[in-house]
Image: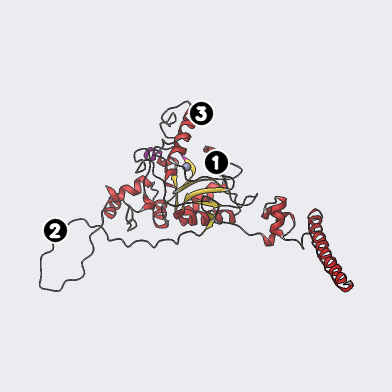
Amino acid sequence: MKKKRHSAKRIIGGILFIAAFVVFAYISCTVAVHSSDLENCEDTYLYRVYGYDRNRYLRNHGREAEIEDDYSVSDETGEVIALPAAAPAAAVVPETVPSALPEPTPEPTPEPTPAPTRAELNAAALGLPAPPNIDINDWQYVLVNGDHPCDPIDYAPANLVYLNMVGDDTDIRTGYDGNRQVVDARIAQPLIDMTQACKAAGLPVYLSSGYRSYSDQAANFKRVCENNGISDGKNYDGYYITMPAGSSEHQTGLCCDITDYYHQIKNDAIAEVATVQWLAEHCADYGFILRFPADKREITKVMSESWHFRYVGVEAAKYMKENNLCLEEFVDLYTT
Ligand SMILES: [Zn+2]
């Protein structure tokens, strides 16, 4: 009996010892935060408990080498998801211009030179090199403007994703829903690649505005018109400063307004900011175009917007940049 009670005491003593150890470890960990000696603590736990931004925390503690970027992509609920693999470009059968049938001949004839496509003929007439052999009806060339609204007018992309960018002074920041920005899933990876490259060039990047729904744009249009004392969305020169709902490219999810975190106001002055200048110079390498350049206002009917970048794919973007064409002019090559 005495022996039994003795062993019970030892068990209780053991439990108390373990409990004391756990409490001691917890206190040590907590004190360590205030003394900046964090080596023995679980970092991610600290970021959460003390509300640190992970990268800022590491930088403040001289641990720059451990800084990692987080360019994950998530769905509406914040669940991190994998982006769909880029679809291989569809093989395009060149559209030929009807010509007279060749005379039948018994002699073997050399391979005939394919007749020029409509786009090649249109480009040649303008003194331009042969344009890319593409299907202009593919999703990335969709033209949305004041004369070509979305079809249907309340169109919404089937697959929207949220870009989760790290937020501190040197990282890419976003202007939607805290630290997220939403775009069509098909342009997420090229957009991440482009903004990462811009950041790597030492420039601050701010993803100001991506996808906007029909109703978002309706509210936006109303607000901008009221603020400017106008009703048609156009400035005194007759160029759009805001698009009516259904006619905004933002509704396609295929574009993003990108600025510098420290120059967020989208006006003419931002054209002088290094971030947008870098983007204008390099965007074609990532499949983007500067959609509303100043010298194309007569065609786009939109004021100069040095912050609005639209995805069209690398091949089309490079052709348009090299030949100074806006999207309206590019699409015209294939459709007129
Ligand atoms: Zn825009």
Q: Residue at x 72, y 51 (%)?
A: 50
Q: Residue at x 40, y 31 (%)?
A: 238
Disc 3 target residue: 227
Give, as a single range, the part of the protein colored magenta. 297-304
Q: Where's residue 59, x and y in %?
A: 71, 55
In the rendered view, tell whether residue 220 sits above or below residue 112. above
In the image: residue 142, left or right of residue 306? left
Q: Residues within 10 Å of mark 1 (few under 14, many from 20)?
A: some
The kind of secondary structure element at disc 2 is loop
The answer to whether residue 10 shows anywhere in this view is yes
Q: Which mark is residue 270?
A: 1
Instruction: Compute the Cα span from label 2 to label 3.
Output: 60 Å
In the rendered view, tell whether residue 293 sits above or below residue 194. above
Q: Which residue type carries mark 3?
A: Asn
Looking at the image, the residue that sits furthest to the front is: 1
Q: Residue at x 12, y 73 (%)?
A: 107
Q: How is the image coloured?
A: secondary structure
Q: Quadrant of the N terminus?
A: bottom right
In the rendered view, tell whether residue 245 sits above or below residue 3. above
Q: Is residue 14 magenta?
A: no
Looking at the image, the residue that sits furthest to the top is: 229
Q: Earlier in the sequence, mark 2 or mark 3?
A: 2
Single out the mark in the foreground, 2 or 3.
Answer: 3
Q: Which residue type carries mark 1?
A: Ile
Q: Which mark is residue 100?
A: 2
Q: Residues within 10 Å of mark 2 (few under 14, many from 20)?
A: few
Q: Which is nearer the eye, 180 or 148?
A: 180
Instruction: Compute the Cα span from label 3 to label 1.
Output: 20 Å
